[in-house]
Image (cartoon, grey):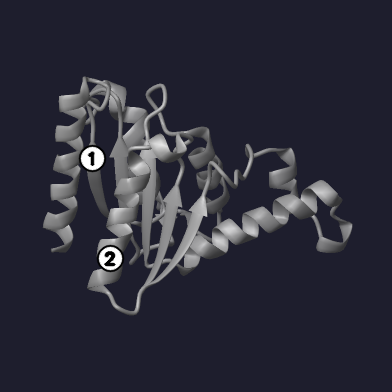
Amino acid sequence: MNILHIDSSILGGYSASRPLTQKVVAALKAANGDAEVSYHDLADDSLGHFSAASLSAGRTAEEARDDEQRLEAARNAKALEEFLAADVVVIGAPMYNFTIPTQLKAWIDRITVAGTTFRYTEAGPEGLCKGKKAVIVSTAGGIHAGQPTGIAHEDYLKLLLGFLGITDVQVIRAQGLAYGDDAKEAALQDADKQIRAQYA
């Protein structure tokens, strides 16, 4: 089993999502002794915003690329290769201002590639990443799951993954983290229980 572990929190040691993604990956490794893990910290090793150079790099012959395009092409290729090789993708997804971090969106823009991870057909779009599993570790200061305020967070990620053909999506959720120390502790303990229940 190949596991791709993605963290996107900008909070470092104060992050709520990072310890939870670590626990999910540890549980997956314990359940699958042959598991190999690729790790990408999108906050410390930012891909940068998807740009004209990002888009044009793939459309320009390698020998004709300028320095910026070569850098973008390498970033794009690495992100895509890691994603394609993964059987399970563990995504740390804190909520910032009702949506995912921009660092995570930049990664999504590099793995959502027409003809490789999805395609358009006469019958409509078709995801080409069937058979993969995704685990979304969702954290938020407020309570947003199932609410309009959560549409651009968990709901967006589920929609995007489904568009790519990934329908086996699990959510480990810790919300209400800004509602006081007791509420935060209860939310984190509940997330631990979710992980144990899934992988025990």
Type of the residue with mark 2: Leu
Q: Which residue is mark 2?
A: 28
Residue drawn at (25%, 27%) of the image: 177
Residue 170 is situated, as x and y percent measured from the top left of the image, at 24, 51
Judged left or right of residue 52, residue 15 is left
Of residues 143 and 112, which is closer to you in this image?
Answer: 143
Q: Residue 167 occupies which quadrant of the picture? A: bottom left
* Secondary structure under the numbered disc 1 in the rendered image: strand
The C terminus: image quadrant: bottom left
Q: Which residue is mark 1?
A: 173
Q: Nearer the viewer, residue 198 or 157?
A: 198
Dot 2 lies on which element? helix
Query: Mark 1 or 2 closer to N-term?
Result: 2
Please say if 63 is above or below 152: below
Q: Left or right? Give the position of 85 relative to 67.
A: left
Q: Nearer the viewer, residue 101 or 62?
A: 101
Kindly report the distance in space between the C-alpha atoms of the residues bearing marks 1 and 2: 17 Å
